[in-house]
Image: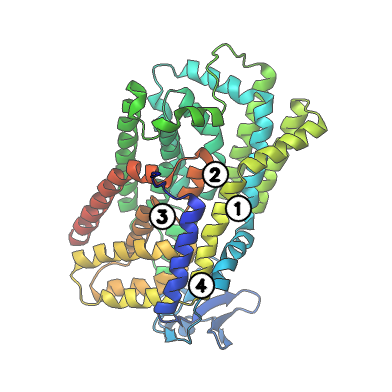
Amino acid sequence: MKKLKFPSAQTILIIIAGFVALLTWIIPAGKYDSLSYNKSSNTFSVTSLKETKELPATSETLNDLNIKIPLEKFTSGAIYKPIGIPNSYKKLEPNSQGFGDLAKSPIKGIIAASDIIFLILIIGGLIGIMNITGAFDAGIAWMAKALKGREYLLIIVVTTLIAAGGTTFGLAEETMAFYPILIPVFLAAKYDAIVGVSCIFLGSAIGTMCSTINPFSTIIASDAAGISWTTGLQSRIFMLTLCLTITIIYILRYAKRVKSDPSKSIVYDQKEAIESLFKIHTNPNIKFTPRLKLITFVFTLCFIVMIIGVSFLEWWFVEMTTTFLIGAIIIGFIAKINEGVFIENFAKGAGDLLSVAFIVGIARGVTILMEDGLISDTLLYYASNITEGMPKGLFTNFMLFIYAGLSFFMPSSSGMAVLTMPIMSPLADTVNLEREVIVNTYQYGMGLLYLISPTGLILAALAIVKIGFDKWLKFVTPLLLILIITTMVFLTVSVYL
C-alpha cells in the first residue's frame, strides 16, 4: 500500500474553496451598508445592494450614521475605501455558490490577482537572466567567504530588515522576489531551505503583525476606528521587539541544529533536490569580476528603487513590475546577452514561477467565493454580537481569535480594517476599553493566523522552494503557540494596567 502524500498547495486551496462554497449554503446571506467619500462632489455615497444615495459630507452625516470617525479622515484621503456602517446589517436572499461558481473561482481569482501575478512572472524572468550571467554563483561564493564562521548574522540581518519593511510599509507580496535570490545564499551557508523561508516569511509576518507606521494596517485601521494612529504606538513597538526577538532565537536554534547535523533538517529528504533546483555550486574559486559586481549592483538597485517607490512615491504593482522589467533589460545589455538568448531565458525564468502565480490566483478565488456568497458580513455580524458584556481580559483575547478567524476568509489587511473597524471598535466602548485595543487585536489576530493561513502567501512561498505545507506546519507550530501565548498574556496585562 502506497504511503499517503500530503496534498499540493493547489489542491489544498481547491479543497478550501469547496468548503467555502459549501458554507454559502449553510451561513445566512447578509450585508452591511457601506459609506464612501466622493472627493469631486464632496459628498458621501451610502451603498446597499438595492440602491446608492448621496449625502452631504459633514460631521452631522457621520453622527447620524453612528460613525465615530472625524470628517477630515475622509476628506484628506486617509480613508479611501468604502467602510461598513454600524447597525446596518440586513439579511439577504441567499446567493449560494454552486459547482459552476466553484469551477470559475480560480479563473476569477487569477484575473483579480493579475497585478501580483505579473509581478511574480517578471521577477521570475529577471532571475532567469541573472542565472545565465553567473552573477549569482560568484556573489554567493563571495558571501560564503565573507560570512565564514558568522553565518548566523545572515539570519539576524535578513529577518530584521524584512520585519522593518513589514512594520513600516507592509512588506508582504513584494517578498516573493526575495525567495529565489536569498534561498541559495542560505543553502551556501550550510543551512536548509526552511531557514531561508522562515527568515523571509516570518520577518514579513512579524513586521506586519506588529505594524507601527504601516499605512495599510495600523494607520487605516486607526483612522477607521476614529483614533490617531500614534495611540498605542509604544505598545506595538514593544510587541514588535519582543515577537521579533522570539522569532529570531527560534530560527537560530533550528539553524544551529541543522548546521551541526544536516540530518536534523525537516527537509533533509529533499536536500539534493532543493540544492539542484537552486543550482548551488560549492566552487569557492569563482571570480566576482567587476562586470558581475555591476550586474549584482543593478539587480540590488531594483529592490531599493521598489522600496523607495512604494514608501514615498505611492507606487504599486504596475510600477514595481516595470522596475524589474527594466532591470532585466539593463542587465542583459551589461552582460551582452544575445536577444534570442535573453528572450528564451526570460521566458524560462517566468515559467519557473508560473505555479506560484497560479497559487496566488486560486487563493484570491477563495475570497471571491466568500464575497459573491454574501457571507463575509454575516460572520462579522455574529462575531460582533458574541462579545457583549464580557470581562475586559476575556473580551480582548476573544477579539484576538475573532480577527484570526475572520482573516482566514478576508486576508487583506486594509480590506479587513475598513470593513470591520467601524463595527468592531465601538465594542471597546461597551466594556470600558480604549479603541486602540481593537486595532491591536486586529493586527495581532491577523498576523498570528498569517503564519499558517493557506489563503495568505505561505503556500506561494513554499511552492518556490518545493516544500510541502505539512513540513512548514511541523516547523512553525511550536513558534506559533509561543507567539499566541505571548500575545494573550500581553493583551490581558495591558487592559488591566
Q: Position of residue 458 (x, y in %)?
A: 46, 48
Q: Which mark is residue 116?
A: 1
Q: Is residue 212 left or right of residue 389?
A: right
Q: Nearer the viewer, residue 203 or 312?
A: 203
Q: Which residue corresponds to mark 3?
A: 453
Q: Could you tell me how far apart the alpha carbons at marks 1 and 2 are, in whole angstroms?
A: 9 Å
Q: Classify mark 2: helix, strand or loop.
A: helix
Q: Which residue corresponds to mark 2?
A: 176
| Earlier residue among tags 2 and 4 | 2
Q: Could you tell me how far apart the alpha carbons at marks 1 and 4 are, in whole angstroms?
A: 20 Å
Q: Which mark is residue 24?
A: none
Q: Position of residue 422 (x, y in %)?
A: 41, 74
Q: Could you tell me how far apart the alpha carbons at marks 4 and 3 are, in whole angstroms?
A: 18 Å
| Earlier residue among tags 4 and 3 | 4
The residue located at (17%, 61%) in the rendering is: 496
Q: Residue furthest right?
A: 339
Residue type pointed to by label 3: Ser
For disc 1, the neighbor class at 10 Å (few under 14, some 14 to 19, many from 20) is many
Q: Are marks 4 and 3 in contact (CB under 8 Å)?
A: no
Confirm whether residue 229 shows in the render: yes
Q: Nearer the viewer, residue 20 or 237?
A: 20
Q: Are marks 2 and 3 in contact (CB under 8 Å)?
A: no
Q: Which residue corresponds to mark 4?
A: 371
Q: Could you tell me how far apart the alpha carbons at marks 2 and 4 are, in whole angstroms?
A: 26 Å
Q: Position of residue 457 (x, y in %)?
A: 48, 51
Q: Is residue 180 left or right of residue 217?
A: right
